[in-house]
Amino acid sequence: MPVVLVGWELVLWYNTDMESKDYSFVADRHTRRSFLAAGACVLAAGGRIVSARETAIAAKPSGKVRFRVGMAGFTYARQSIDKTLVSMKRAGVHCLCVKDYHLPLDAKPAEIAAFRRKCADHCVTPHGVGVIYIGSEDEAKRSFDYAAELGVPVVVGAPWKPAADGSSDMRRRRQSPELCAKISDLCAKYDLKFAIHNHSRNPKTGWPELFATPADAWDVVKDMDPRMGLCIDVAFAFADGFDPSNEIRKYSSRLFDLHFRNISNPKDGLSCTDSTTGVIDYYRVVKTLAEVGYEGVCGIELIRPFPKRSEWINTSVGYFKGLMDAVNRENTKS
């Protein structure tokens, strides 16, 4: 059972369900409200609060949280689908954005049906596919056939074209508005959504010419089929100097997916850390998502280091569910 001790300066978290049992001391980086959220995350994870100072929250009422917590498939890179599903069931998270190393893009209908049954056996529902890097019309159609057969409502992707000088360096791929126009037609044909993932404008950690920011994606899709939209990677947006809450508000009408992770370096969107200890104020992000009425899935995406993956998955799921509970509790009191 998880136990938390909440004060103004320290959070003590002990989760005896983790494979690696330890105490984690977490310095609060944000506001007193963060401590209420940290306590609530224990309740959401089935734990108990040992002691806590009262926290006064003077905030305007906001909407009820309507989104679900899920897992981005990249969290389980280099891990089998069987181990992935066991981990998700143990963590109590039930939505998975499927990556092609768990289900190949060229999978046959029988293989996809077997995959769906395996997910159902572990109480997991595929809610999307991707990120898929699409470099041609044929690849786009294959991705939509794949998503339609799996029965998911959204394809998360990044349509690309080669670097201007023909370089094969993946980080120099450029966004392709021309291919997006073709994909817009597929959205109408298949009645599926397509969410473009932002990849950061930092040349050391991102792909600066491949939909680096949410604005880059918006400028391409805003006049296309309304099923063309965005998947905002919150950490990349934050590391690029944007306020994630403002980005969510600006693009909420076409926001079809999100990726959650916290980071230790505010300039590096890949400096993944335990969700409870990073520099991004996710309480505010969750509150904003409630205010705009987002009803999709927020996928936890833990990129590195992989040796801590099991531990961070458990704490992250509890933490984000706790933030959701804290926002709802605040609204009830308001």
Image (tube, helix red, strand yellow):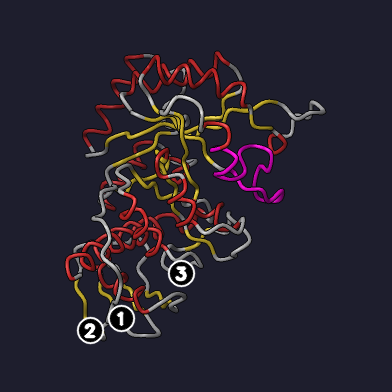
Rendered view: 6 above or below 76: below
The kind of residue tagged 3 is Thr
Report the Cα–Cα distance between label 2 and label 1: 6 Å
Q: Residue furthest right?
A: 165
Are there few (<14), some (14-19), or many (20+) residues within 10 Å of tag 1?
many
Helix, strand or loop under label 1: strand
**Amino acid type at mark 1:** Val
Tell me which residue sits at (25%, 69%) in the image. Answer: 40
Looking at the rendered image, the quarter that the N terminus falls into is: bottom left
Which residue does the image show at 20% across and 66% down from the upper left?
A: 329
**Residue located beneath label 1 in the image:** 6
- The x and y percentages for residue 54 are 24, 84
Instruction: Choose the circle earlier in sequence order: 1 or 3.
Output: 1
Mark 2 vs 1: CB contact within 8 A:
yes
* First reached walking from the N terminus: tag 3 or tag 2: 2
Q: Which residues are magenta?
A: 199-218
- Identify which residue is drawn at 27% across, 82% down: 55
Residue 59 within the segment the image draws in magenta: no
Q: Secondary structure at mark 3?
A: loop
Q: Nearer the viewer, residue 257 or 151?
A: 257
Quadrant containing the C terminus in the rendered view: bottom left
Q: Position of residue 228 (x, y in %)?
A: 46, 29
User: Mark on residue 51?
Assistant: 2
Splitting the image into 4 quarters, where does residue 175 fall? top right
Please name the residue that numbered disc 3 is placed on: 277
On the image, the x and y values in percent for residue 63 come to 26, 56
Residue 299 image position (x, y, % from top left): 39, 46
